[in-house]
Image (spheres, grey):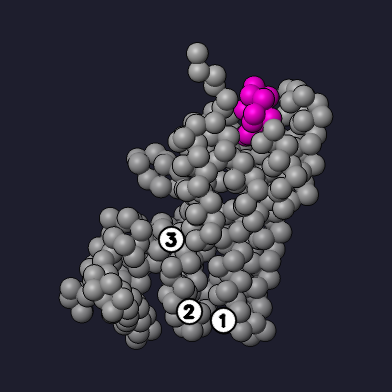
Amino acid sequence: MRKDLGISYDGLKYALSIKDNYLSGEPLTVMGAGAQQRLLMPEHLLSNDLALMQYDDPLALAVIATKDPESPMALAAAIRMGPHAKCKELITGVFEVVSDATKHELVADCAKLLSRNAFSPEAFQLVRNRASNHVVEIREAYRRAMAGNLRALLDGKMAAREFVEEFIELASHGNLRIDIYRRLVMKLMRSDAVRPSVKFMLLERLDKFPQMVKVQIVNEVNSAPDTPEYQTLKQELRWIYESKARAKTATTDVPETSKNWFGGSSLDYGAAAGLQSRNAIIKPQQPALRRPGVLSMQSSGGFSTREIASWLN
């Protein structure tokens, strides 16, 4: 009879795939309602009510616990791995390796606490509570940093390039929900108070955004009114696409397509960027996200750090 050690070939494939994601900087995603890809969040890993497919494999969880640069995700993965370690001796050994190999002190402490207490229900409850509080604490820290950067940008105390670089880093590493992520980017793109150079730099770094945010940015710019500023942004978007297409053709002789640039998105990027009709305005595939009762940025002329703080709560 074959003994179940808790490790499978599929699990190894999942673990290697996740490792590749970290090396390439691609975010981890999970299939949500309506077969839509969603960012994997710490809350998903901490929930016992969600079946997360490959992210329920102990080896995949071990990679997240050791490789993720943000402690909330790493801690949540280690906690989700705990029940596997309790049931399988080999996974218990892997779990001990995780506690030694993780780059986060809090993850190591919680993993060792579970091991010392033989993965008791009381120990699990303790580390789950600590993880939930830690997620809130980290998000609040990122929220304060983003709000402070926004205020500094609007006051002219922070350079546009520095703001964009830190915005992308904070948004990516702050475990923001994808709807909040999109709202923040859209507010920046729509606001009359934000310098056009910031919007150009956001477009230049389009590859740095999650898939769902990329699509929203392209749709938003292309469906915007034909003001001089947005006409320039549309031209920039077309230039970015054409530049990528030329670079791809020069290296592989295969023309760039929306599929390979957007990593499997169904969006026709060439059409969305206005390449099929230079003066056409194509309707966005998704409605622009707006807070009920809040005027659009074009009519309000800007936004306050209080607003951004409310979205991040």
**In the image, residue 255 lies in the stretch drawn in magenta:** no
Q: Is residue 281 above or below residue 66?
A: below
Q: How many marks?
A: 3
Under mark 1, the amino acid is: Arg
Residue 201: image tag: 2
Residue where numbered disc 1 is placed: 161
In the image, residue 257 lies at what x, y percent?
26, 66
SS under mark 2: helix
In the image, residue 70 lies at what x, y percent?
65, 54
Residue drawn at the location 48% of the way across and 79% of the way down: 201
SS under mark 1: helix
Under mark 2, the amino acid is: Met
Q: Badge 3 local density, few (<14 within 10 Å), some, or many (20+)?
A: many
Q: Is residue 262 above or below residue 234?
A: above
Asked whether the viewer can see residue 79, the reply is no
Q: Badge 2 local density, few (<14 within 10 Å), some, or many (20+)?
A: some
Residue where numbered disc 3 is placed: 213
SS under mark 3: helix
Separation of marks 1 and 3 at Cα, in angstroms: 20 Å
Asked whether the viewer can see residue 119, the reply is yes
In the image, residue 271 lies at what x, y percent?
23, 68
Under mark 3, the amino acid is: Val
Q: Which residues are magenta?
A: 80-92
